[in-house]
Image: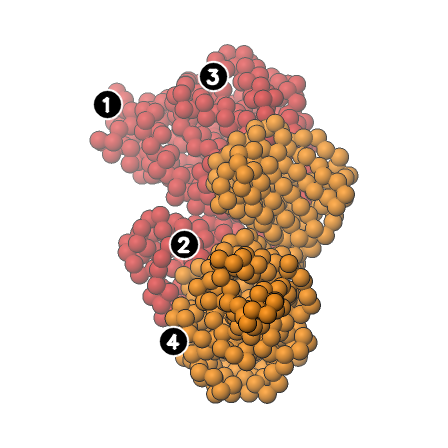
Chain colours: A red, B orange
Amino acid sequence: MIRKISGGVTAARGFSAACCAAGIKYRDRTDMAMLFSAAPCVAAGTFTSNKVKAAPVLWDMEIINAGCPVQAVVVNAGIANAATGKAGLDLCRATAEHAGKALSVPASSVLIGSTGVIGPLIPLDRISAGIDAMAGTLSDSQEAGTAASKAIMTTDTVNKEFAVAFDLPAADGSGTVTVHLGGMSKGSGMIHPNMCTMLGYLATDCAIPRSLLVKALRTVVPDTFNMITVDGDTSTNDTLLLLANGLAGNRPVSEGDGSYDVFLEALYSVCRDLAVLMASDGEGATHLVEMRVYHADTKENARILARSVVGSSLVKAMIFGRDANCGRILCALGYAGPDFDPAAIELFLHGEHETLCFYKDGCVQPFDEEKAAAILGEKEVRFSCDMKMGSEEATAWGCDLTHDYVTINGDYRS
Amino acid sequence: MIRKISGGVTAARGFSAACCAAGIKYRDRTDMAMLFSAAPCVAAGTFTSNKVKAAPVLWDMEIINAGCPVQAVVVNAGIANAATGKAGLDLCRATAEHAGKALSVPASSVLIGSTGVIGPLIPLDRISAGIDAMAGTLSDSQEAGTAASKAIMTTDTVNKEFAVAFDLPAADGSGTVTVHLGGMSKGSGMIHPNMCTMLGYLATDCAIPRSLLVKALRTVVPDTFNMITVDGDTSTNDTLLLLANGLAGNRPVSEGDGSYDVFLEALYSVCRDLAVLMASDGEGATHLVEMRVYHADTKENARILARSVVGSSLVKAMIFGRDANCGRILCALGYAGPDFDPAAIELFLHGEHETLCFYKDGCVQPFDEEKAAAILGEKEVRFSCDMKMGSEEATAWGCDLTHDYVTINGDYRS
């Protein structure tokens, strides 16, 4: 059974974190974070599908794809190190080498993440000074993990961390051991479901073969991080990393004994919670929007339909305005791509205490405007659609479109 | 040679128009328009790709696809007659029958267009009274065309009409005759390049076989109406109609004698002007945004790349804020889909008097922030990208994302 526990990236045994104010772009706040594992980790990652990949994405992809053991991650906020050419890649190499020396691990075991403005180069001296400061203050405390999750924020308004614990058979056959999986992520704008859509770092003490770690991440991402959208813009820097150091002492996870299913459920739980929190913390957002599509013909069609609704500017603006102009939900399903019968489907708006059917038999249904406005005033607005076609379903999460989104992105660099 | 002339939908011989205030949803303004041709027309049309098609779209598609002669169009603003099921289709039939009687033409020659809120039914008695009023006031004056173009507006801030004249060989062999093509369109929100993205009505007195009329429209739409975007939402009601009554007296257009190319150029000119005007009049817009992609490997890739940039919420918000955060242009190219080499391409910002290169050799280039802010302050903001791959090009148009867009769409129905 998966149990939610407090904490984040330091919840799992052997993982420590640190952060510092390196002065890369922001003033008067922390802007660098470090994650370190006492033992080398097997690692899996998913990366942006953007053709323009930031330098740290290229650096991490090389290490992850080569299957190198991973022991540290260095992250900065404020500058993305994207569209920086060879100088940006050189900076990554220098960062990893500096961190490797400071932590006494190979440079090839150091992963890098950057988020912020596209274009400028990050000053290496500040990165180096930041690494030196962090290497001396690493801590496995819950507070250290929380502080790291705050240091990687950009336009985020809340830090994002979750952790779970679960039991697996012990490696020595003596009953079970408790395994932990925790993670942090950042992401608020330039978020769209295409690969992982943000920076996310997951750390577990689970003993698991690399092949199963990779498989688990690939299984979970399409239904979690790839099902959120804030603005339809897929970043140049999206990175999700999952590190496993094996220190929990469990019998290595395998598909034959049910332990893989437990691990998968734990991973899904943390990824889903992080993803939904990112959607609700979308730039300028005042509402979380959830769209569940069920009885669809295929899983992929269910995903496409659900994402189309939460991605629609008109749906997003209507929720901001608490205007139950529900034809827009139907419209967004209609242009999503998958075929369906408009006369067969049924659409619902779910409040905390009440559900309204606002479309069936091919017609928008009369509904109580006051009730609808009240439901749209709730912090979390949920819609669902019965496609009447099959047995597949998917849920997507987004947020409303507000004046603040425009303000934030009309003047992002200053 | 194609000559721009004043006027719109009544510019071509034999076309008359009327409008009235039918009180369908708006108060104190006209909200219905009628277009009538003195002679039966061959007709071509493109329609929304949305799976949820409004009743008037289904009505028009049936007539256009059957190749029926067309003689009138009845349009209303305020209610879209979408998601109205069988009652909505019955209303279309009753509308066409009533207009057919009033104009002494077959109901099957009457096309219908509706734009506005999805869901409600349009009261037939108001439609019928509107038709009766308009049938008695049809006029081929320029003013009547202009008034019709105003009656079909919803959130549009300007009416949209253009016309051209061109010469073709006379049918009787006696030199040339002047042929006219004029049109009007409406569209401001729920606009996205997928088929024609709005209501548009084009009328020409050119004699042209239906097969060539259809071919011409299909040739021109992908580079004009399908290259604009306001908010990425493809409407349930998009309709573009092209009627040709042959009254100019030209030798019927054919592909063998060059006359088809002249007609195509005239059609492109009117469609492009209407499309660009719609983009610049996007809901809440303060800037027209143009993105030209050239030296692309294929035409379709050039279109996809150009549209991705003008469709990006982050690019749109940055232009509203006059913040030259040009990495976002690169980012939007990168997630568009087509493959390219980020180290090879070059990106430019074009002012009225100056061009800035802000990305080349894989790096964002230093540029004069003041100059960039000045260019972003111009009413029309133009970007271009040299893909360094081939010889194809495409241009897309959009607008900025503003507080007013959010306000308009947060409370559209009231």
Question: Crowding near pointer 3: few (<14 within 10 Å), some, many (20+)?
Answer: many
Give percent across and percent down for residue B270.
Answer: 61, 61
> Do badges 1 and 4 share one subunit?
no
Dot 3 amino acid type: Ser
What residue do we see at 37% from left, 54% from top?
A338
> Do badges 3 and 4 share one subunit?
no
Question: Crowding near pointer 2: few (<14 within 10 Å), some, many (20+)?
Answer: some
Residue B91 seen by the camera: no
Residue at which label 2 appears: A337
Q: Is residue A204 above or below residue B411?
A: above
Label 1: which secondary element: loop
What residue do we see at 36% from left, 30% from top?
A214
**Upstream in the sequence, badge 3 or badge 1?**
3
What number is the disc on residue A333?
none
**Circle 3 chain:** A
Dot 2 amino acid type: Gly
Tags 3 and 4 touching, CB below 8 Å: no
Q: On the picture, is A346 further left or further right than B153?
A: left
Residue at which label 1 appears: A173
Question: Crowding near pointer 4: few (<14 within 10 Å), some, many (20+)?
Answer: some
What number is the disc on residue A108?
3
Q: On the picture, is A177 further left or further right than A316?
A: left
Dot 1 amino acid type: Gly
What is the distance, in whole Å, between disc 2 and disc 4 at their CAs? Answer: 24 Å
Comparing labels 3 and 1, the label whose residue is closer to the camera: 3
Give percent across and percent down for residue A136.
Answer: 57, 17
Tags 3 and 2 touching, CB below 8 Å: no
Residue B51 seen by the camera: yes
What is the distance, in whole Å, between disc 3 and disc 2 at their CAs? Answer: 43 Å
**Upstream in the sequence, badge 1 or badge 2?**
1
What number is the disc on residue B86?
4
